[in-house]
Amino acid sequence: MKITILGCGTSTGVPMVGCDCPVCRSENPRDQRTRASLLVSYNDHTILVDTSTDLRRQALREGIRRIDAVLFSHAHADHINGIDDLRGFHFLHKEIIPCYGSKETIGTLQNGFRYIFTELEGSGYSPLLFPHEISAPLVLFGRVIVPIPLQHGKTEALGYRIGNFAYLTDCSAIPESSQELLMGLEVLVIDGLRWAEHPFHFNVSGAIAAARQINAPRTILTHLTHQVSYGDGNRLPEGFEFAYDGMEFNLR
């Protein structure tokens, strides 16, 4: 199973518009972050997690040729507003892609992007996605996908576990019942927004504390703001690192 971090940035991306801070002016390409999303490839299939605002740019950069399914973590703009960029894949393959998310997330998507799910009379545009509400594990292309309920400030989001890998973006707490679903991981990717505290996201120290409860040998912090320099990764404990756009790794 191959994992590609398509984007590891927060909702503004990095550089942030109008900012001249050291990270936004950094010449290190690993400080340039598109909005958070993930690609999972196995058994000759490709699953996209979230249609980030920068999906087109990410797909071109990574040479993505097809998407077989989409998992949505939640319906905040930076995680869904690239949804229209799925049109290119539909033009090539003429397939309606299944997508999965919580009841609330799917409802928000259908209300905000009705044309993505329903052919509007006289429009001539075919639907791009077929929605599925999920609250329990499902099987996609021969592997079990486990949705992981998360707290994201005062709202909820879903993380996902596939085999010995889990992706927990946009979270400020992991319920005890979800902790039990995360035991035995090899790699964890988790929200670690910035060094300072934030009401809706783990900060770096909060992400480290949460990850230590899960005890994966390798933990990667994502959804990073311009207040985090990739070069500061040497401040992290052993077994922890910052994500960067285009980061790839393989799991058994």
Image: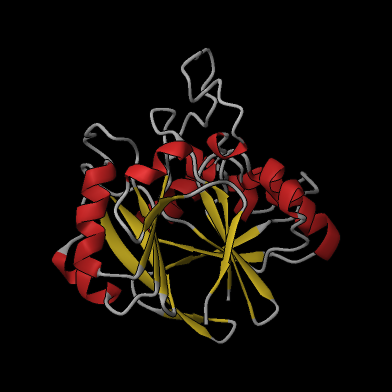
Left or right of 92, for residue 42: left
The colour scheme used to paint the residues is secondary structure
Answer above or below: position of 40 versus 155: below
Residue 224 picture quarter: top left
Residue 32 x, y percent position in the rendering: 58, 34
On-image quarter of the N terminus: bottom right
Give whichever of 67, 26 is nearer the camera. 26
Which residue occupies 68% across, 63% down? 67
Residue 223 x, y percent position in the rendering: 42, 43
Examine the rendering and report whether any part of residue 202 can be seen: no
Residue 92 x, y percent position in the rendering: 85, 59
Examine the rendering and report whether any part of residue 123 can be seen: yes
Residue 113 picture quarter: top right
Give whichever of 116, 161 is nearer the camera. 161
Give whichever of 147, 25 is nearer the camera. 25
Answer above or below: position of 154 versus 168: above
**Which residue of the protein is positioned furthest toward the left in this rendering?**
176
